[in-house]
Image: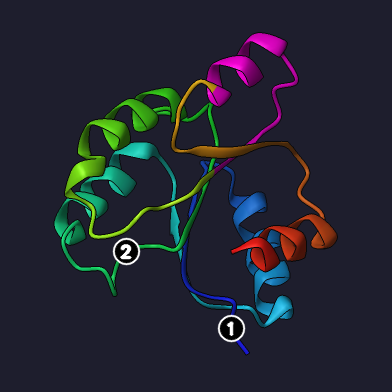
Amino acid sequence: MYSIDRLFLIDDDNLLHFLMKRMIDKSDRVKETHFFFNGKTAIDNLRLIAGEKDKLPDLIFLDLNMPVMDGWQFLDEFTALSDLFAKKIPIYIVSSSIAAEDILRAKSYEVVNEYIVKPVTKEMLINILEKL
């Protein structure tokens, strides 16, 4: 029983990829998970599939601090492209930053649903997946 078909995790941390993959797999609520190590590879992928509703993610988990293209740059590009997407894609910021200015800035983006401070627990993941 899947809650969502496709999830994108955009984070440069190998350990987070490993832990999230295990939690996602055990939750049995996500059909497909795609992992990206920076915002650029993720945004390039989204550009390619923008008009294909069945290939777009149902949910994006996004880190803020990454090399190449950080989460802020990703959000700016994503927002600029959002009219091209065949469906609305919710973004959850997953960051180690507890800075109030980061939280406020993230919430200023209409596409950001929630700001989560790492680590993500199994309960948090299930709660998010059940909301969709």
Magenta stretch: residue 128 in it?
Answer: no
Q: Residues within 10 Å of mark 2 (few under 14, many from 20)?
A: many
Q: Position of residue 94 (x, y in %)?
A: 63, 39
Q: The residue under label 2 is which amino acid type?
A: Leu
Q: Position of residue 95 (x, y in %)?
A: 65, 33
Q: Residues within 10 Å of mark 1 (few under 14, many from 20)?
A: few
Residue drawn at (60%, 56%) of the image: 17
State the count of labels: 2
Q: Secondary structure at mark 2?
A: loop
Magenta stretch: residue 104 in it?
Answer: yes
Residue drawn at (71%, 13%) of the image: 99
**CA distance for labels 2 and 1:** 16 Å
Q: Which mark is residue 131?
A: none
- The quadrant the C terminus occupies is bottom right
Say which residue label 1 marks: 2
Quarter where residue 100 is shown: top right
Write down the region rendered in magenta: 92-107
Say which residue label 2 marks: 56
Q: Position of residue 124 (x, y in %)?
A: 79, 55
Quarter where residue 87 is shown: bottom left
Q: Position of residue 110 (x, y in %)?
A: 45, 31
Q: The residue under label 1 is which amino acid type?
A: Tyr
